[in-house]
Image (cartoon, rainbow, N blue to C red):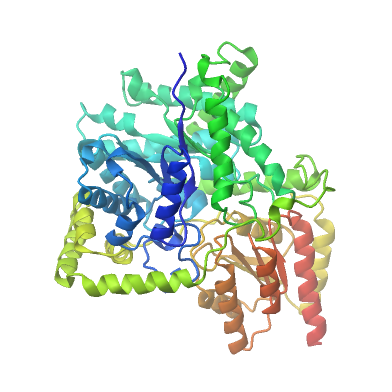
Amino acid sequence: MTDRPWLFRTYSGHSTAKASNELYRSNLAKGQTGLSVAFDLPTQTGYDSDHVLARGEVGKVGVPISHLGDMRTLFDQIKLEDMNTSMTINATAAWLLAMYVAAAEEQGADITKLQGTVQNDIIKEYLSRGTYVFPPEPSLRLIGDIAAWTYKNTPKWNPMNVCSYHLQEAGATPEQELAFALATAIAVLDTVKVQGAVSDEDFPRVVGRISFFVNAGIRFVTEMCKMRAFCDLWDEICLERYGVTEEKMRRFRYGVQVNSLGLTEQQPENNVYRILMEMLAVTLSKKARARAVQLPAWNEALGLPRPWDQQWSLRMQQILAYETDLLEFDDLFDGNPAVDKKVEALKAGAREELKTIDSMGGAVACIEYMKSQLVNSNSARLGRIETGETTVVGVNKFQNGEDSPLTGGDGGIMVVDPAVEQEQIDRLNEWRDARDNDAVTAALAGLRAAAREGRNIMPASIECAKAGVTTGEWGFAMRAEFGEYRAPTGVGKAISNAAQGLDDIREAVDAVSAKLGRRMKFIVGKPGLDGHSNGAEQIAVRARDSGIDVTYEGIRMTPEEILKRAVEEDAHVIGLSILSGSHVPLIEEVMDRMTKQNLSIPVVVGGIIPDADADLLLAKGVAKVYTPKDFDLNKIMFDIVGLVGAEDQAAA
C-alpha cells in the first residue's frame, strides 16, 4: 500500500494581504496542499504599520496583518474550514489566531474543524529569532492559554510548534537542537499542567496536539538520525514524565523547513542540490517522516524568492512524492546498525544536555546559558568554514565557475515596492476611521482585565478582533499588563582564543589604539525590527576576541538610539546588521541623522543586500557593505581596523 504524501507547503507572504492572497491561491492551484503564512515584522512584534519601529519593515519579510480586515483579505476565496494553515507567529500568536478564528466564523466555518498550527514557541525567540515581546513568565502563560482554549474549541489545531529550526540556524549542534527543543516542550507542558485549566483526564490530548518544527541540514544522514532520535526521546518524555499511555498521543509530529543557513550567495544554483538532499533527511525514513514539508528557494541568500522560485521548490516535493517509489516501502533504516549507533549517540548527548538544563531549573531559567551555547557553537561552525575544515562548495573550495544565468535580468529575486508601506498605512487609517471606537475601547479594557486577572486571553482577543482592534493596540494593551523584555545577547565579555589567526589583528588593534590614546571602540547595532542576530553576534564576538572594545546591546534599536550610544561611548566605528530587507530606508536614516549631527564615524553594514542596494548605500557614505559571501571574519576585522587608522590619519 502506498502511503499518503506529507503536506506540501511554501512559506510565503509579502507586500500586502491582497498580493499574498493571490500568491496563496496560485500556489494551491499548482498542487500545494497547505498554507504556511509569513508575517511581516511589525505584525510579529505587535506594532501597527505606522509605528516608528515599523519604518522600512512593512511587507518585507511577510504579509502585514493590522486588523481583521487584512485577515479577511488574506484568505479571500480560501475556505478555512477545509484548509490546513501554519502560521509562523509567536509573541502575538494569540492575536493572530483570534483574527483567524474570527475570519473563519465570518466565512461560516465550523471552527471545531479548523486545522493548522501557530508556532507559539517563545523560548526559541529569546534564543535565536528575536520576535519576542513579553517576559518569559507571561509568555509561557499565553502559550498555555492557547493550548487550553484550542483543545476545547479547535481540537484539530496544534497550539504550538516547538521550533528547533531556528536553533540550528543559530548554530546549534544536533544534540543541542534535540535538547533545547525538548526542554522547551517540557517547560510549556509543565506550565499548562500548573495552570490547572486542563483536567488530568484531558491532559494527554493536549500533549498529543503539541507539534514540532525542525530543521534539516546538509549532513543529511546525521539529520535523518536526529529525526529518529527526536521520535524516541519524545515518546520517552510523554510516557515517563507525563504518563501518556496511548501511543498515538506520544507520536513525534513535525513539520520542517530545510536549512537556510547553508544556502550560499556564491554559485547560488548549487543551493538546489542542497535543498534536495536536506529534504531526503526528513522523508526517507518512514518512522521519522515529516507530516508537512516546506522548502526554501534556491535564491534566499540573495533576497526574496519570486513565485517561479517557490514553484521550483514545490515541484521538488511533488516529484519525490509522486514519481518515485519512496512511499511504497516500510522504513528503509530499521535494524541498520550504523543508523542505530548514530541515533543512540545523539540521544545520549541530548539526554546529558537535558540533565544540565534540568539541574539549572529548566528551559526558562536557562535562557542565558542556552543562548551563550548557541553563540559559541555558531562561532565554532564559522571557524571551521574559515579554516577549510568544513568544505562549502563555491565558497571556500571550487570557487571558479561560470556566471549563473539564473541571476540575470531582475537579479534573480523579488523586490517589494517601497510604496507598499504608505499604502498599508493609508488602509490602516481608513480602518480606524470607519470602526466603532466605543466598541474598541470596551474590547481593549476587557483584554487588559483578562490579562491582569489571569483569565484565558483567547476569548477577549477574539472580541477585540471582531471590534476592530489593531495589532498595535492589542500589543500595547498586553505590554501595559505584562511589560517588555530584552533577551541576553550571548556575547560575553571574556576574550576567547578559539578563533585562529588573530595575532596580526590584535597587533593592528593595539597599534591603532595606541595612536588613539585609548582602546578602539566599535558599536554593533541592529536597527529596526529584524531579530535575526546571528551575524551581529558573530561580528561582536570576533571584534571582542580581536581586542576591540565592542558594545552590542541586542536587537530592535532605532537609528536614533544607536547613534546616541555611539556618541556617548565616543565610538570609532559603527557596524549595522539588517537581514529583513529594510536596509535602504534604515541605513539612509542613520546616515541622514549623522549628517545633521556632524558625525564623521565610519559606518559598515552587513546583511542580505543586493548589489544595486550596496551601491546606493556606499553612495550615501557607508564605508563598507558585507553580504553572506564575506565569510572571512578576520578580513572584516582588518577592514574595520583600517577604517579607524585612516580616520585617525585624516584627523591628524
Quadrant (top left, top right, bottom left, bottom right) of the N terminus: top left
Query: Looking at the rendering, which quadrant does residue 583 occupy?
Result: bottom right
Tally of marks: 0
Tell me where residue 646 appears, x and y as whole percent.
Answer: 81, 78
- The relative height of residue 260 versus residue 358 in the rendered view (above or below) is below
Q: Nearer the viewer, residue 426 or 461?
A: 426
Question: On the image, which quarter does residue 285 sit in?
Answer: top right
The C terminus appears in which quarter of the rendering? Answer: bottom right
Would you place residue 45 above or below residue 406 in this image? Answer: below
Position of residue 119 relative to residue 245, above or below, is: below
User: Which residue is pictured at 67% across the width and 43% down the height?
Assistant: 271
| Residue in the image at 25% along x and 48% along y | 104
- Above or below, 264 against 42 in this view is above
Furthest residue to the top? 335
Please name the residue shown 34% across and 21% down the image: 248
Q: Position of residue 261 (x, y in %)?
A: 62, 46
Relative horizontal placement of residue 80, taking residue 621 as reference (left or right) = left
Q: Nearer the viewer, residue 512 or 237?
A: 237
**Image check: 594 left or right of 194?**
right
Whether residue 51 is visible, yes or no, is no
Q: Position of residue 363 (x, y in %)?
A: 43, 41
Q: Is residue 616 visible?
A: yes
Residue 545 horizontal side relative to residue 427, left or right: right
From the top left corner, tell me how far across and down residue 80 is, in percent. 30, 44
